[in-house]
Amino acid sequence: MNGPLSIAVIVLALALGVWYLVRTALDRAPSNADLWAMLGLGALVAVLVVVAVVGLFIGDRPSEWTTFVGYLITTIAFAPTAVYLARLEPTRWGTLILGVACLVLPVLVLRLQQIAEVTGG
């Protein structure tokens, strides 16, 4: 796993998560800028996943590679799914969906790093 890229995803996701939770507390529906910011985070996550997939073929493969691939699929699908659900719920709860998704993404990235490091990837 790419260290600086992972850190960038984690920091951006946490910053956006705090922003969305503040907006939820202020009873704000998700704006177009909020949705685009989440999609931007999703694009950064997609770059991270592509780097990890290339690492599976070029570098060392984790011994638990099926678990690793499952986490990759979950990680890349998380941001677009959150945007879709937030669009379905154009109230403060849609903003909460984005906030919770942003708080879950760092956990998924950290778990990917743990699997890659502990199992030899």
Image (spheres, rainbow, N blue to C red):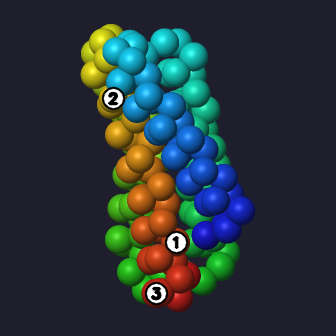
Which residue occupies the foreground of this view, 74 or 9? 9
| Quadrant of the rendered image containing residue 51 | bottom right
The answer to whether residue 103 of the structure is visible from this angle is: yes
Q: Could you tell me which secondary element the residue under label 1 belongs to?
A: helix
**In the drawing, what numbered circle is on residue 64?**
none
Q: Disc 1 marks which residue?
A: 113
Q: Quadrant of the N terminus?
A: bottom right
Q: Please name which of the two marks, 1 or 2, marks the residue nearer to the observer.
A: 2
Residue 113 x %, y %: 52, 72
Instruction: Specify the amino acid type for callout 3.
Output: Thr
Q: Around disc 3, counting alpha carbons within 10 Å, would you say few (fewer than 14), some (14 to 19), or many (20 or more)? A: some
Residue 55 x %, y %: 63, 70
Q: Around disc 1, counting alpha carbons within 10 Å, would you say few (fewer than 14), some (14 to 19), or many (20 or more)? A: some
Instruction: Specify the amino acid type for callout 1.
Output: Gln
Q: Please name which of the two marks, 1 or 3, marks the residue nearer to the observer.
A: 1
Q: Residue extending furthest right?
A: 4
Instruction: Specify the amino acid type for callout 2.
Output: Leu
Q: Disc 2 marks which residue?
A: 96
Please give left or right for residue 4 compared with residue 115 in the image.
right
Could you tell me which residue is drawn at 28 percent across and 22 percent down?
93
Residue 69 x %, y %: 42, 64
Residue 47 x %, y %: 64, 49
| Quadrant of the rendered image containing residue 63 | bottom left
Q: Could you tell me which secondary element the residue under label 2 belongs to?
A: helix
Q: Quadrant of the C terminus?
A: bottom right
Which of pointers 1 and 3 lies earlier in the amino acid sequence? 1
Q: Please name which of the two marks, 3 or 2, marks the residue nearer to the observer.
A: 2
Cα separation between marks 3 and 2: 35 Å
**In the drawing, what numbered circle is on residue 119?**
3
